[in-house]
Amino acid sequence: MLIMGVDPGIAISGYGIISNEQSNCYVVEYGVIRTPPKLAMPYRLKQIHEGYIELIQKYKPDVVAVEELFFNKNAKTIISVGQARGVAVLAAALSKIEVFEYTPLQVKQAVVGYGRADKQQVQQMIKTSFNLEELPKPDDAADALAVALCHMNSYKLRNIMDGRGF
């Protein structure tokens, strides 16, 4: 199974693609899609959407896991992040790929074992989990890998609960 994790953002949108083959899980690719701050919002969203479409066409993930929004005191920030999240979900839907959504609390709980873990703890666990030589950077890419890993763990757990094994 190939899983694409998404950590949405308007300035920086993280992505992480992992593979889970016969209990062997590894990182295929990770990085970010950046948009220039001076670019008008519609064109930033277009750029993010095109970036995700390009990644989907290149890697052909089986599923896309997206981090849900968390409450933010800044309404403008939450709206723009919500729009970026929407174009990521749209890219998957247009590509006929099933989308799964996880809260930041669920992701941290699945990856670190503690729902209030900080960015450094998440990065360290991603490095350890995937046997990477260095911490994945920037944070947005590490978070996207964490979302993908959260989905993989949830998928395995659902199969066990359903009696299908791994």
Image: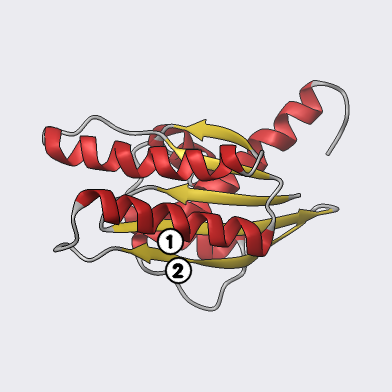
Quarter where residue 121 is shown: bottom left
- Above or below — where is 14 with respect to 67? below
Tell me residue 69's x, y (percent).
33, 34
How far apart in space, not on screen, are marks 2 and 1 (Cα)? 7 Å
Q: Which of 44 and 146 is in front in this view?
A: 44
- Residue ranking furthest to the bottom: 133
SS class, disc 1: helix
Is residue 113 visible in the rendered image? The answer is: no
- According to the image, label 2 marks what residue? 136
- According to the image, label 1 marks what residue? 141
Q: In this view, does 27 lie to the left or right of 83?
A: right
Q: Nearer the viewer, residue 132 or 101?
A: 101
Amino acid at dot 2? Pro
Tell me the mark number nearer the camera, choosing from 2 and 1. Answer: 1
Q: Residue at x 57, y 33 (%)?
A: 100
Q: Residue at x 45, y 62 (%)?
A: 124
How many numbered tags mark residues here?
2
Q: In this view, does 58 lie to the left or right of 67?
A: right
- Above or below — where is 34 with respect to 92? below
Q: Residue at x 23, y 42 (%)?
A: 80
First-in-chain label (2 vs 1): 2
Q: Which residue is drawn at 49% across and 39% down?
A: 90
SS class, disc 2: loop
- Above or below — where is 111 with respect to 19? above
Quarter where residue 139 is shown: bottom left
Residue 78 tag number: none
Is residue 63 visible in the rendered image? The answer is: yes
Q: Could you tell me if the residues under marks 2 and 1 are in contact, i.e. CB atoms within 8 Å?
A: yes
Q: Is residue 137 left or right of residue 152?
A: left
Amino acid at dot 1? Ala
Tell me residue 41's x, y (percent).
22, 50
Colour convention: secondary structure
